[in-house]
Amino acid sequence: MKRFVRPAAREDMQRQFRYYLVELDVPDLDSVEDAIRVIIRNPGIGSQRPFPNLPGLRSWPVPGFEDIRVYYVQTPGVLRIVRVLHGSRDLGRILKKEENPID
């Protein structure tokens, strides 16, 4: 399956894990990849997130960092990682600021 990780999601991953490494000394950097592999193996897994401009948006926790969520849209043959954020963040406000959240 083809994957597309948005630049904003890539930045989210770097920021989240930099925080965990510095503040909590947690060295597991492969956790997001583990979550993505689970999503690829189980299409449609995770909680649906109703956003009018993002039909089909779902979230899945990052193993070992369950407060961190992978927000994604899956269409036939393509997995788009939209963002990787702490679950308590205001996703509506964050996505509203972006013009094309799945491009």
Image (cartoon, helix red, strand yellow):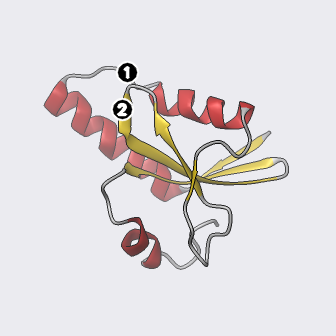
Q: Is residue 37 left or right of residue 22?
A: right
Element at badge 2? strand
For label 1, count other residues whose C-alpha is less than 10 Å away and answer few (under 14), some (14-19) or many (20+).
Answer: few
Find out whether the residues at labels 2 and 1 contact each other: C-beta distance under 8 Å. yes
Query: What x and y, as percent, mark residue 21?
Result: 24, 28
Q: Which residue lies furthest to the left in this view?
A: 23
- Looking at the rendered structure, the number of numbered marks drawn on it comes to 2
The image quarter in which residue 24 lies: top left
Q: In this view, does 81 lie above or below 63?
A: below
Check disc 1 and give the amino acid type.
Asp
Residue at x 77% of width, y 50% of height: 78
Q: In this view, does 76 lie to the left or right of 18?
A: right
Where is 96 relative to 77, above or below?
below
Q: Which residue is drawn at 63% across and 65% down?
A: 102
Helix, strand, or loop for circle 1?
loop
Q: In which quarter of the image is the C terminus?
A: bottom right
Kindly identify which numbered label has been placed on residue 20.
none
Residue 50, above or below 18 = below
| Separation (CA) of disc 2 from disc 1 | 10 Å
Q: Give coordinates of residue 97: x percent, y percent.
A: 42, 78
For the residue pair 1 and 75, the one nearer the viewer reads as 75
50 above or below 28?
A: below
Which quadrant, please, contains the N terminus? Answer: top right
Disc marking residue 65: 2
Q: Mark 1 points at which residue?
A: 28
- Which comes sooner in the sequence, label 2 or label 1? 1
Name the spot of residue 49 as percent of width and height, x first.
55, 62
Q: Residues within 10 Å of mark 2 (few under 14, many from 20)?
A: some
Three-letter code, disc 2: Phe
Looking at the rendered image, the disc whose residue lies closer to the viewer, 2 or 1, is: 2
Residue 58 rendering spot, x and y as whole percentages: 59, 54
Residue at position x 39%, y 69% in the image: 94
